[in-house]
Image (cartoon, rainbow, N blue to C red):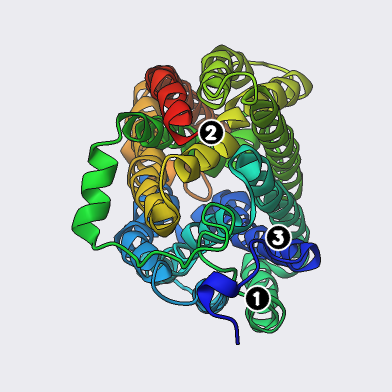
Amino acid sequence: MNTPAEQPASAPPHRTRVMVFMLFVVCSLNFADRAVFSALAQTIKADLHLTDLELGLLQGLVFALLYALVGLPIGLLAERFSRKRIVALATAIWSAATIGTGFAGNFVQLAANRLIVGMGEAGFTPCAASMVGDVTPRNKRASTMSLVLLGTPVGIFAGATLAGQIAASWGWRAAFVAFGVPGLIMAALFLLFVQEPRRGMIDNAGAAPEPAPPIGTFLATVIGNRPLVWVIAGGSLAGFGMTSISQFLAVFLARSHDLGIREAAAAFGSVSGISIAFGLLVGSFGTDYLSRRDPRWPAWGAAIGLICAPPIYLAAFHAESLTTAIVLLLVAGSFLLMFFGPTAGMIQNLLPPRMRASGVALYTLLYTLIGSGLGPVFVGGMSDVFAAQAYPGNYLTDCPHGLAPGGALAERVAACAGASASGLQMALSLSVLSFFVAAGCFLLAATGLKHKAQTSA
C-alpha cells in the first residue's frame, strides 16, 4: 500500500471518467426527484386542498430546513471521512423519502417527507465538488463540475416529463414511487464503482494531504476571504429568484396558459432542461476558457447573465402567447444559469483542498436558506396576496385554496382562476429583481479573483 507521498499525482483517466459519470447520474436523480414535485404541484394542490403558501412551504422552507441545517456538518464530515460513502447514503435517504411522498395524505405528511428529502440531498453537492476539485486543475474545475451538474437539466427534464405522463395515467402518487426506486439502486452502484480520490491530488501533487482544519479556522478563512464572501452572497441571492421560478414554473404555465397536467409538466421540463443545459455549459466552459486571459471572467460572466435575465423573464411572464412565453423563458433561463457553474468553480479555487467540501456546504446552506427556503415561500405568499387584490370580491371566501368550490357558477370559476393566475404572475415578476443585486455581488468579487490568482501563481 502506498504512503500518501507515494500515491500518484493524478487519478487514472478512466477512474476520473467513471467518477464524473456516476456523479452525473446521481445529480440527475437528485433533480429528477425535485422536478416531480414541481411538475405535479398544481395536481397535489387540488387533491390535498393546499394554498399557494403551503405549496411554497413544501417546495421551499420545509424542503430547505434540514437541507440547510445538515449541509455544513456534512461538509465538515466530508473533509474527514469517505465522500463516496456519504454520497451513497445520502442518495438512499432522499430516494426512500421520495417514495414516502407518494403515500402522503395531507400537508403534514408531505412536509415530513420533504424534510427527509432535503436532509438526504444536502449530502451530494459538497462531496461532489470536493471530489472533482481533487482530480482537476483550477482552470478546468468549473467546466468539469458542469459535466456533473448537467445532471440538473437532464433530471429536471426527465423528472417533469415522465412525472406528467405517469401522473396522467396512474396518478401523482405513482410518479414519486417510480422515481424513488432507481435512487436506491444507484446508491449501491456508487459504492461499487467509484473510487475515493486522494485529497489535494492536483494541488499538492506528491505531498501528504494536509489534515482537515477545525471549524474555527475554516470560518476565519472564509470571513477573511473577501472575494469568496461576495461569490457566496451572489450565488445565494441568485438562488432566491431561480428557485422561485423553477418551483412555480409548471404552476404558472398551467394557470396562465390553461394547460393540463401532462402539457404543463412537459413544458416545464423542456424549458428548464434546455435552458439549464445551455446556460450551464456556456457559463462554465466559456468562463474557464476566458479565465486563461483574465481570472475575473468567472465573476464577470455570472454578472452578465444575471443582468440580462430579468427583463426577459418579465416579458415572458406577461406574454399572451404560450409559444412566445416559452421562447422567452428559454432565453432568460439560459442567461440566468450562466452563474451556476462558475460559482462552484470560484469557491473551489478560492479555498485550499481540505476546505472545499466545507466551503461548498456553507454556500449550499446559504443558497438553500435564502434561495430554496425563502424564494418559493415569498412567491407563494405574495401570489395569495396579489390574487386577493385581483379578485373582485372576497377571495378567501369565494376561492378557498385558490379554487372555486365544486358546483360554483362558471363566472365564479373563471374569476377565481383569473385571479389565481394574475397573483402568481405578479409574484414571479417581483422575484426576478433579486438577480440585479446578485450581479452586483459578483462584480464586487471580480477584483479579488485577480489578486487571488496572482498570489496563487
Does residue 65 appear in this view? yes
Give the distance between the C-alpha atoms of the residues marked 2 and 3, in whole angstroms.
Answer: 45 Å
Which residue occupies 80% across, 66% down?
Answer: 14
Give the distance between the C-alpha atoms of the residues marked 1 and 3, in whole angstroms.
Answer: 11 Å
Q: Earlier in the sequence, mark 1 or mark 2?
A: 1
Q: Residues within 10 Å of mark 3 (few under 14, many from 20)?
A: many
What x and y, as percent, mark residue 179? 67, 69
Number of marks drawn: 3
Q: What residue is pinned by disc 3?
A: 20
The residue type indicated by label 2 comes to Ala
Labelled pair 1, 3 in contact (Cβ < 8 Å): no
Quadrant housing residue 135: bottom right
What x and y, as percent, mark residue 299? 50, 24
Q: What residue is pinned by disc 1?
A: 195
Name the element at disc 1: loop
Q: Residues within 10 Å of mark 2 (few under 14, many from 20)?
A: many
The residue type indicated by label 1 comes to Gln
Labelled pair 1, 2 in contact (Cβ < 8 Å): no
The correct choice, above or below, for 61 with respect to 17 in the image is above
The residue type indicated by label 3 comes to Val
Front: mark 1 or 2: 1
Which residue occupies 46% across, 22% down?
Answer: 450
What x and y, as percent, mark residue 31? 61, 56
Is 65 in front, or is 79? Answer: 79
Q: What residue is pinned by disc 2?
A: 417
